[in-house]
Image: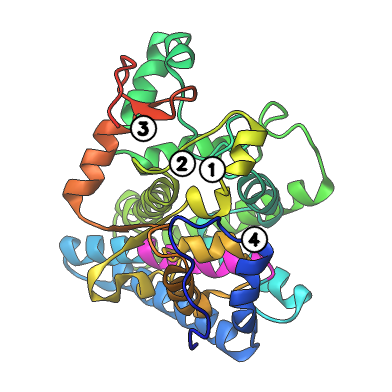
């Protein structure tokens, strides 16, 4: 895509979101074949990784295959994520089928993810009281928690437990047969999708147990390496991705809708996390996240071009962060709680860190 317009100066008013979408309009084109091939490829890789867990003679190789399976589940999830946004293929019906199929290994109910992610997260990104994904507590909110719940928050924000956060706070409480407290709205499709992923999980457990018995291996070891390990790796991957997308010393949270709207949240509350060796492409370009929030209809296979277009047109506006372990741990150290009045991240004692 060629840049036919001049960049907007950093001190000029940010154009309306419709203008930004006009810039990206040529990229909102979808195809049928490529997404289906991606789905088949990722499922083939997942099957190969799980076969490696069963057939490899070395426990180390089995572990590596189980770890790889978790990463591949992440790739399948990203395909489903796009399908759920109706941005993967031109057909809404095909998108729903692809989405449900690609969501199965991560045990994600399609309809519940659609509500929590498409409606809530994208509709109210970084607006406290609405967006619940990695929403930081204020010092007053943290102080009102019980001691065990405070320790859980400390663990979640340590930088070492994104998988624990996602597994408990997102998947268990809001996606997998959520309680009425977490999801007051009850729709028949929610239950059907939960039963679908539960049946798939039971099928996988049954197949793994059968493979263990047939190959005269420990059933517990096979379940640990072919079921528990991939799911934990997947939860850790998605927990990290969600954290990195919207947690940064330059990214703010809001509790006032007027102030939030004036902050242009579709640009200001997202982070473009960059990696060497085109690692982002291995995750289907999910890290080109600003472009995704500006226009959810852009398919994953065009996000790289869309992100480069935005960064060309909006110099110094978009948070671009090269990944390093040092940066990540420093962010986890500084971004514990959030002061909504001063718009500063603080530590657990309320002392500003940004």
Q: Which residue is mark 3?
A: 156
User: Which of the labelled discs sits on residue 17, or is there none?
Assistant: 4
Relative to 27, is 163 on the left or the right?
left
Give the crowd class for mark 2: few <14, some 14-19, many >=20 residues within 10 Å.
many
Secondary-structure class at tag 2: helix
Name which of mark 3 and mark 2 comes first in the sequence: 3
65 vs 262, nearest the viewer: 262
Q: Which mark is residue 322?
A: none
Is 139 placed above or below 176 here?
A: above
Structural distance between the alpha carbons of marks 3 and 2? 11 Å
Q: CA distance from mark 2 to mark 1?
A: 5 Å
Among the two numbered marks 4 and 2 on one chain, the one whose residue lies closer to the N terminus: 4
Q: Do the residues bearing badges 1 and 3 touch, measured as CB atoms within 8 Å?
A: no
Residue sitting at x 37%, y 43%:
250
Magenta stretch bounds: 70-86
The kind of secondary structure the magenta stretch mainly shows is helix
How many numbered marks are there? 4
Q: Are marks 2 and 1 in contact (CB under 8 Å)?
A: yes
């Amino acid at each position: 895509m060629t840049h036919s317009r001049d960049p907007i100066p950093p001190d000029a008013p940010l154009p309306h979101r419709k203008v930004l979408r006009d810039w990206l309009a040529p990229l909102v084109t979808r195809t049928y074949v490529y997404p289906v091939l991606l789905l088949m490829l990722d499922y083939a890789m997942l099957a190969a990784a799980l076969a490696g867990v069963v057939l490899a003679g070395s426990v180390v190789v089995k572990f590596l295959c189980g770890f790889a399976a978790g990463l591949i589940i992440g790739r399948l999830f990203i395909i489903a994520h796009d399908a759920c946004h109706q941005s993967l293929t031109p057909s809404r019906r095909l998108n729903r089928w692809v989405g449900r199929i690609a969501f199965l290994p991560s045990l994600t109910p399609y309809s519940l993810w659609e509500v929590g992610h498409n409606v809530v997260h994208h509709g109210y990104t970084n607006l406290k009281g609405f967006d619940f994904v990695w929403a930081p507590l204020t010092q007053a909110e943290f102080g009102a928690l019980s001691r065990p719940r405070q320790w859980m928050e400390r663990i979640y924000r340590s930088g070492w437990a994104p998988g624990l956060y996602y597994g408990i706070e997102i998947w268990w409480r809001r996606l997998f047969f959520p309680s009425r407290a977490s999801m007051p709205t009850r729709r028949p499709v929610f239950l059907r999708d939960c039963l679908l992923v539960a049946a798939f999980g039971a099928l996988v457990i049954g197949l793994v147990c059968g493979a263990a018995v047939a190959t005269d291996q420990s059933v517990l070891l096979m379940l640990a390496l072919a079921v528990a390990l991939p799911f934990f790796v997947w939860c850790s991957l998605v927990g990290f991705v969600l954290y990195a997308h919207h947690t940064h010393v330059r990214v703010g949270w809001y509790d006032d809708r007027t102030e939030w709207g004036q902050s242009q949240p579709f640009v200001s509350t997202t982070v473009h996390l960059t990696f060497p060796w085109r690692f982002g492409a291995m995750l289907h370009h999910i890290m080109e996240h600003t472009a995704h929030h500006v226009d959810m209809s852009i398919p994953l296979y065009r996000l790289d071009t869309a992100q480069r277009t935005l960064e060309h047109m909006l110099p110094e506006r978009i948070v671009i962060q090269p990944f390093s372990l040092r940066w990540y741990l420093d962010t986890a150290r500084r971004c514990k709680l959030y002061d909504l009045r001063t718009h500063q991240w603080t530590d657990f004692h309320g002392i500003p860190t940004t």
